[in-house]
Image (spheres, helix red, strand yellow):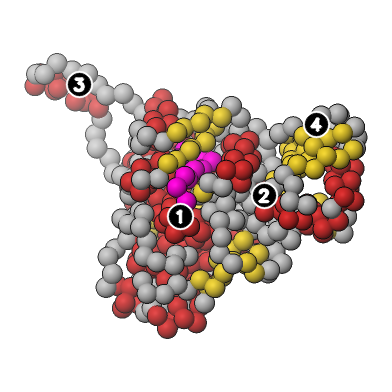
Amino acid sequence: MSASFVKGMKCRVCGTTYPVSPNNFCTDDFGPLEIDYDYHSITEAISRSKIEMRTWNMWRYREFMPLDNDPTVGLHSGGTPLIKANRLGKALGIEDLYLKNDAVNFPTLSFKDRVVAVALSKAKEFGLKTVGCASTGNLANSVAANAASAGLESYIFVPADLEKAKILGTSVYGAKVLGVQGTYDEVNRLCTQVAFKHGWGFVNINLRPFYAEGSKTMGFEIAEQLGWKTPDQVVSPMAGGALIGKVHKAFQEAYKCGLLEKEPTTRFFGAQASGCNPITDAVKNNRDQHKPVKKPNTICKSLAIGDPADGYFASRLIRDSGGWGEDVTDDEICEGMLMLAEYEGVFAETAGGTTLAVARKLLQQGKLSPHGKTVLLITGNGLKTQDAITSHVEPPTHIAATLDAFEAVRESLGDFTPLAKTQFKTQLVGV
Amino acid sequence: MSVRVQIPTPLRPSAGDQAIVEVTATKVGDALNHLIEIHPAMGGKLFDNGKLRRFVNIYVNDEDIRYLDMLDTAIKDGDEVAIIPAVAGG
């Protein structure tokens, strides 16, 4: 890349501009800082055909990323499949359903590989040697893996009660892992203090303005995979609430810079677990500001952020775009995971189950339309949250290694049916 | 009551370049008011028309005041009040 298209950073509340630095908030009013781009120059520099000639990964949209030079970390992230989910769509009654499958992102099987690729490339541009994050798991995996490959020291802070697979999938890369006794929000507060005290690059704290931009690539990919068109509806899981906003931003930028013919009118729907639903609660009760949830209680730990940094912006986007927000119980989340697996062969983590179960609930409420193109964002891999689903899956039938033994049990295994074994059993609450 | 107020690094130029400012107060709101008396530049950053700004969180001994009594939260000698930007994480 020859030139940077970044003008600086800008406060999302008061518009004050700042030079690029490892800082995430406005010193006038604590508002979040966002990257300020020169869209005119981006428009001149890119075109559909130029993008289409590039390798199929997130960096084909590099002009929209806040780096001064070519990326140096996470060079193979993004470029995940957009699956046309015909069987699932039919089962749910959604006409034109797609799954954006970041459960197979590289290197650590979640959408966080996109944001970390940007944050650590930027950390290297800043000359930082030590990086870190506050994480509910997926981010921990990705920071640890990408820091290892970039030769950076990493400090990863997670709630001590996190799923074993997510802790192991962090420690294995040689990261310094701190299991903090407390909720994610307490981990996050501690990390803010550590980041500023030591001047380290915490990807979702002082590097957050750069980090969050990586999520836009999920939106650019969806638009390109739909033939440079935006979907009518997007259902996004929400933890900190940034992803949903960044996908929206990507659609807007793609239009502004001439990659789309039609102005996007996508309606955005947000999904949370009922045991931690600050954003959907704010949407449903028409509150401007979310009420923080002190003690999240859900199997969906990756979404268990009680005090989401982007809660205000996410709930506003959902309402302004004509979408809605809903939350679902742990049982509904498990059923959602099974439906994704049995109908589409996608083993998503609990957040994926949440997103599907919320889509189903919104459809039954008449908030989500059965018509038009609908994309569900699948952000993480089910292999990381096996604990949540183990008791819901039938154990294998054990037999002797003989044909007779197989024939003896064959009938009890049942006939093949194109319908999934799992049907939604839970009664919908609040429909 | 003497309490210590932690200032986040990027705001220290408005607080005499100090990491910690000692103030005297019995409630969190009074502690912040005392801080502003000492360093008036902090006033407009923390408050907007008398209301604590949306993206600033205040903690007393690591507990968020939204789970306590907000600005009326009582504080005692030796307590630590931390001003922490809210736009982190996720």
CA neighbours of label 4 inside 10 A, class few (<14), some (14 to 19), many (20+): some
Query: Label 1: which residue?
Result: A127
| In the image, residue A135 lies in the stretch drawn in magenta | yes
Residue B59 visible to an observer of this rendering: yes
Instruction: List the single residue furthest toward the front.
Output: B17
For badge 1, the amino acid type reads Gly
Is A57 on the left-hand or right-hand side of B68?
A: left
Three-letter amino acid code at the position of disc 4: Asp
Q: Which residue is mark 2?
A: B9
Amino acid type assigned to the residue bearing label 3 in the image: Val
Left or right of B34 in this view: A269: left
Give the residue pinned by disc 3.
A409
SS under mark 2: helix
Disc 1/disc 4 C-alpha distance (Å): 37 Å
Q: Which residues are magenta?
A: A127-140
- A172 or A241, nearer to the observer: A172
Q: Are marks 1 and 3 on the same chain?
A: yes
Which residue corresponds to the image point at 36% horizontal and 65% vertical from the top-left?
A70
